[in-house]
């Protein structure tokens, strides 16, 4: 059975401020967190949604009809869509 051990610092050091020195320890991160936010209309708190629309025709595009591509000057280079099929 493994015994619980406290975290081990990745770096130990001190920050000197004149006659005072403060000890500092740096630990590695174990979890990553993201903060999600929404787009709101200013002054109303109404949610603004993004609708996938064809820039040339103005028609709505389904998610299956969307692929990723990079602009290579006078043409687009298509990449993997990340969706099977």
Image (spheres, rainbow, N blue to C red):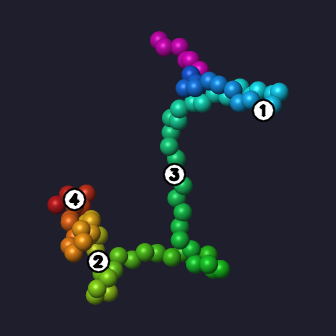
Towards the viewer: 3 or 16 = 16
Cα distance between the residues tagged 3 and 1: 34 Å
Label placed on residue 80: 4
Is residue 2 one of those drawn in magenta? Answer: yes
Relative to 29, is 67 on the left or the right? left
Does residue 68 appear in the picture of this structure? Answer: yes
Relative to 70, is 42 on the left or the right? right
The mark nearer the N terminus, 2 or 4, is 2
**Residue found at the very far right of the displayed protein:** 19
Cα distance between the residues tagged 3 and 2: 29 Å
Q: Residue at x 58, y 26 (%)?
A: 11
Q: Residue at x 81, y 31 (%)?
A: 18
Relative to 51, is 43 on the left or the right? right
Relative to 75, is 32 on the left or the right? right
Q: Residue at x 81, y 28 (%)?
A: 20
Instruction: Magenta stretch: give its range.
Output: 1-6
Q: Where does label 1 land, which residue?
A: 17
Q: Position of residue 58 (x, y in %)?
A: 32, 87
Q: Where does label 2 land, which residue?
A: 61
Q: Where is residue 37 in the image (x, y as percent from the top left)?
A: 54, 63
Q: Nearer the viewer, mark 3 or mark 1?
A: 1
Q: Which residue is drawn at 20% across and 65% down?
A: 78
Q: Position of residue 66 (x, y in %)?
A: 26, 70
Q: Where does label 3 land, which residue?
A: 34
Are dots 3 and 2 in contact, CB under 8 Å? Answer: no
Q: Quadrant of residue 60?
A: bottom left
SS at mark 3 in the image: loop
Reply above or below: 56 against 83. Answer: below
């Amino acid at each position: 059975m493994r015994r619980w051990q406290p975290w081990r610092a990745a770096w130990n050091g001190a920050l000197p401020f004149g006659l005072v020195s403060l000890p500092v320890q740096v630990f590695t991160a174990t979890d990553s967190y993201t903060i999600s936010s929404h787009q709101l209309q200013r002054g109303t708190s109404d949610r603004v949604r993004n609708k996938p629309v064809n820039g040339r025709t103005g028609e709505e595009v389904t998610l299956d009809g969307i692929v990723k591509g990079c602009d290579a000057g006078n043409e687009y280079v298509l990449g993997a869509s990340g969706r099977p099929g």
